[in-house]
Amino acid sequence: LQVSPPVTPLRRIYHALKSKSLPRNRTHPCYRLLLRVVCELKQFAMVCIVKSNSQVSGASSARPSDGVKQSQGHATKAVPRSKSSMVAAATLMVVLIFSLDTILLEWIPNALASWKPEDSSTTAYLVSICGGYLLLPLFLHCRSRRSSGSSSARTAIAAGRRRSSGAGIGGNAAKRPAAKQAWQARRRQGGSNDWPGGVEGGSADGDKIAAGTLARLNHSVSRAAAKGDVEKAGTLLQSLTSMGWESEAASYNVVIRAHARRGEMRLAEGWLQKMRESGVPPNEHSYVALMSACAKADDLAGAEAWARRMAEDGVPLSCVSYAVLINACARLGKIGRAEQWLQRMIDAGVDPDAATYNSLIHACSVQGDVQLAEQWLEEMKAKGLEPTVLTYTAVIDACAKALDVPKAERWLESMQAAGIEPNVVSYSAMINACAKVGSLARAEHWYGQMEARGVEPNAYSYSAVINACAQVGDVPAACAWLDRAEKTGAALDGVVYGCVIHTCGKVGDAECAMMVFRKMQAQGIKSDIAVYGALARPFAYRGDYTSVEGIADEMEAEGIAMNDYLLYTLLQAHSRAKPRQSQRAEAAFLAATKAGVVPNDRILKVLSLAVGRARCSELARCYGDRRFVR
């Protein structure tokens, strides 16, 4: 269907021109007005777009090469496009295209035709079209004036606040042009987000801007470190400090902490030295970052060394510092050393907090010392400190290691009676206590209690229940719990599948173990040496050396090196094979020892079963181990 366009003033102009009632030339006022409006607005729109693109291309061409950036020691950042300019240019182009369509096609939609009366004049219609164009240039003109004003204000404070060592007013005045040029160059390269500005002088406004400079500096460094770009954070801090910007300890601490968390202790220590050289004294947070990294790596001696160095530098240890040291002792189960640091803490006049006692109780749980854990809990209450969920969980874990399930259940009930809701770690510790004594029914009971209270289980919870199945050798129950875990969508890991494989291997069900292993691989879960050892064990018991060798080859293909346990399993498969595979056992032993595996008594014993006692003595003598040579 062909819809006839409505009668509009443009249609009237068209019909008038067609009927030669108006002169058809470019000198007519209607033509001149339309052509001028269209040409001017088209040119203005193109200028806006070209200008916005030239800003981005100019910033890209002004960037130095990678080598120059490294020599200057600062990062660059692309200049963002002006959103207002782009929106205005896009809007202008849309209106322009619509107007051209209207003029050339001489038809407008019915919805727009209904906006004006039918008998409106041509002049009024043209004015209504051009009104929208006049608003956009007016908006851009006002915005350009505001942008130029703010740019002038930023240029005025671009000199920055620099440290001066004995320089007077004349020296500061001489530095301002250079500082201004350096600031403008870096602002063109990297934008103003990562390069804070300051002002020279001692006025109140200058102090405010200087304070803002430090805040923005810390924020820029912290933002880069939070994104994991420690190199950028360090480069930014080093570049600004070398230019003379005043920095504070917080900026250095961010970089030190980021390197320490990544285990890069040498780099962290290097930044601590740079901090001293720049005249910024390290504070407690600087040393705590290094102490925490040592504690996480179970390096108690390193953490204590940094604590001594901290005291030598005149920085007093607070509750946070002592808590880090006590936690380092707790991770290793060194209760006596943790108590010594607690006593030093009290002698220094620092009151222990709940985190300190939680670390002490955790040390007791590592050793399974339930009585001492309960003693520290009572002392904690006597000092007016409220136990937390971590406190009770540590006591329950101590009971689990001591195989005291009834006491663990009493502490869990006491925890609930105190108004503290157990979390998934608390219930998992309780289930693990039941699993250690082989009480599958109690483990399933506490799992049900956890679900009834709305606590979502995790991989550790399922592995604890499956361990209970392994204790009683219930392979169907272990597989059922694995299927249940997969259906719930829980984030499972190799430990959960390894528990099921261990359960299958314990009863000699090699086929089921291999099925679970393939299922784990189908899920994309990485295996480890413990899983491969549990998988190879049932095949070794039946003397299936071919399968064990295939498992060992598959393990090495994944980049996992053989250890003493898997070597023992492989030699056991050779010794149990029918007939006995002496040559394969000898070759496997020599290859493993050449790769760095140290044979122990169990390996030498199973090797003697595979190759004979005499040949085993010769191999041990060649290796240099005379323990088996008698």
Image: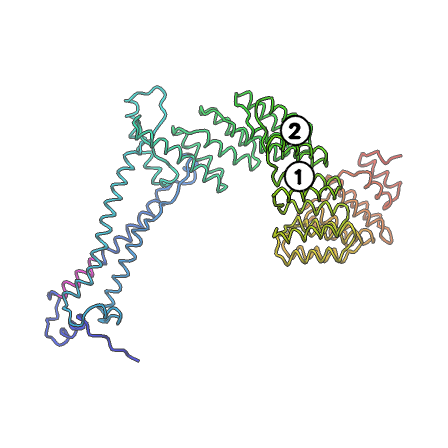
Q: Position of residue 625 (x, y in %)?
A: 81, 34
Is 40 left or right of 563, judged from the image as shown? left
- Name the quarter where the C terminus is drawn: top right
Which comes before the other along the chain, label 2 or label 1? 2
Rendering colour mode: rainbow
Q: Position of residue 209 (x, y in %)?
A: 33, 32
At mark 2, the secondary structure is helix
When asked about the image quadrant of residue 405, the answer is: top right
**Label drawn at residue 297:** none
Circle 1 packing at 10 Å, graded few (<14), some (14-19), many (20+), is many
Is 402 left or right of 526, judged from the image as shown? right
Identity of the residue drawn at 19% across and 63% down: 128
Amino acid under disc 1: Ala
**Label drawn at residue 394:** 1
Can you tell which of label 2 and label 1 is closer to the viewer?
A: 1
Identity of the residue drawn at 74% across and 48% down: 533
Q: Position of residue 138 (x, y in %)?
A: 21, 52
For disc 2, the marked residue is: 338
When asked about the image quadrant of residue 289, the answer is: top right
Q: Which residues are magenta?
A: 30-40
Badge count: 2
The answer to whether residue 19 of the structure is visible from this angle is yes
- Name the quarter where the N terminus is drawn: bottom left
Is 418 left or right of 213, judged from the image as shown? right
Check contact, mark 2 vs mark 1: CB within 8 A: no
